[in-house]
Image: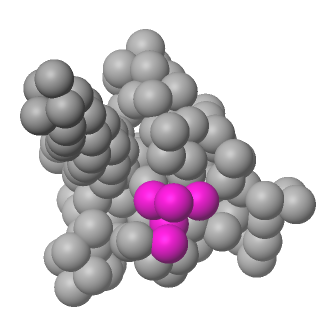
Amino acid sequence: MATVETILKTKGKAVYSVTPATTILDALKLMAEKDIGAVMVMEGDKVMGIFSERDYARRGTLQGNPVTTPVKDVMTHKVYYVGPEQSAEACMAQMIDKHFRHLPVVKDGKVVGVISIGDVVKTILSDKETLIKGLENFLVGRDFKQ
């Protein structure tokens, strides 16, 4: 069963962040440039929240001008985390239950990566495909011996 660490080895451990004072527009530019759906909102090493495309769609368009409004006004303040040892299946369950698409990965109190629902789904599908191929090979080998 794949873990968060496995996902990070595949996708990389880059953590993109902005400060609470960063404007919505600047955060969106960074997200577009890096082709990501969310950025961590941090003051130094301290997580203040997470800002996602969903935050912009749900609150950013309604609360002022994206050129002047800081992300702190529209970000998600309650952030859920996972550790590198957590299974991909557990991450998916948490994302579905809490209705979010990005999970910061924390190790020793520090954010070491961010995974998305897409990363998790790809990993789980790959695991299932490997399992199916193994079962097919087992059955074919078994039938061949009889």
Examine the rendering and report whether any part of residue 17 can be seen.
no
Quarter holding residue 117: top left
Pinpoint residue 77: horizontal percent, then vertical percent: 58, 39
Outermost residue on the bottom side: it is 33
Examine the rendering and report whether any part of residue 127 can be seen.
yes
Magenta highlight range: 5-9
Please tell me which residue is depicted at 36% across the width and 59% down the height of the picture. Answer: 38
Magenta stretch: dominant secondary structure: helix
Image quadrant occupied by the C terminus = top left
* Lateral position of residue 109 relative to residue 124, left or right: right
Please tell me which residue is depicted at 56% across the width and 66% down the height of the picture. Answer: 113
Please tell me which residue is depicted at 49% across the width and 46% down the height of the picture. Answer: 2
Name the one closer to the observer, 46 or 80. Answer: 80
Please tell me which residue is depicted at 76% across the width and 76% down the height of the picture. Answer: 44
Quarter holding residue 105: bottom right
* Lateral position of residue 48 relative to residue 140, left or right: right
**Considering only vertical position in the picture, is 30 above or below 48?**
below
Quarter holding residue 5: bottom right
Pinpoint residue 133: horizontal percent, then vertical percent: 19, 42
